[in-house]
Image (tube, rainbow, N blue to C red):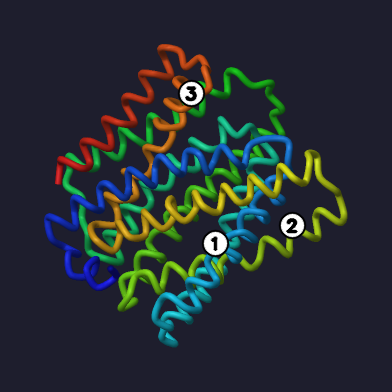
Amino acid sequence: MGEWLVSIAGTPEGARLATLLALLSAVCHAAFGALQKGRHDPFLIRGAIDAWLVVITLPVALFLVPWPTPETFLILAGAVVIHFTYKATVAFAYQRAAYTVVYPVIRGTGPLVTAFGAALIFQEHFTAMQWIGVACLSGAMLLLALRNLGEEKIDRRGLATGMIWALAGGLLVAVYTVYDAYGIRQSANPFTFLAWFFVITALDFPILAAYRYRRYGSDGPVRDLVWKGFAGALIAWVSFGGVMLATRLDKVGEAAVLRETSPVFAALIGWFILGERVGPRRLVLMALIALGAIIVETGG
């Protein structure tokens, strides 16, 4: 299957599959982000997810995909540093400010910076119309954060710190998106890169989570933490794996923008499945996020 994916990269068929993978990634990322919201320390949740990622993926890496080249291992070593920094930054942001405020800031900053990075590294340039789409999507996400802020009890010091961490997280989204796209593109078999990526970049947070659990304990039942971690690992494979395959098949910037429609799917899940009230202003912002993605996809 890896050879087939490589063969359709850069073709209309590959572009269509990349679009589907990026949208599927957006749906799964909405669920993945929600898993990190709740009673448990964000570091513990992420540690549980990463522990399950190692357990699930290691047999695949060892027995089902070709062995990585030394160059791939070197790129993966860099990915460890980038993704650890990103995960820690997001966890700090969730600790300092409300999830509903932090999440749109992180995701809204990412595609804007990714588009610049893709132009610089891969020479993938957006048209003027596509830049309008990016501005529409990112602007709507930041407005969504402001809208959600109005529903929170404001701790100004915590909010300011949380926003700094959230903006840093958004920049790191762009960094890891471009870096991972480079890594998966240089690998002869994309599934080799994916399997070893999920193993190697998931080794750090279980250690950190175990330390924090021994020192601070857990705010919720450990059994819930374990099952959330298992669900998160399965979702992560589809979410992060899907968008990386999309960047292998088609343009990095377009895949990044489509993936950042995840707040739309998060709102739809909350509305139709969880019975949450969305409200007219939030619906308008969701529509603008979707419109921005459509403009980027069709304006090239």
Q: CA distance from mark 3 to mark 2?
A: 31 Å
Relative image position of residue 76 (x, y in whole percent): 48, 74
Mark 2 secondary-structure assignment = helix
x%, y% of residue 62? 50, 78
SS category of the residue bearing label 1: helix
Q: Is residue 286 left or right of residue 205?
A: left
Residue at 64% across, 45% down: 228
Which sits earlier in the primary sequence, circle 2 or circle 1?
1
Numbered tag placed on residue 273 in the rendering: 3
What is the C-alpha distance between the residues marked 3 and 1? 31 Å
| Closer to us: 63 or 246 | 63
The answer to which quarter of the image holds residue 258 is top left
Q: Is residue 44 above or below residue 161?
A: below
Disc number for residue 254: none
Residue type for callout 1: His
- In this rendering, which labeled residue sits more in front, label 3 or label 2? 3
Residue 194 figure quarter:
bottom left
Element on which disc 3 rests: loop
Q: How far across and how far down the image is residue 11, in percent? A: 13, 60
Mark closer to the chain start, 3 or 1: 1
| Residue receiving disc 2 | 209
Circle 1 residue? 83
Q: Nearer the N terminus, badge 3 or badge 2?
A: 2
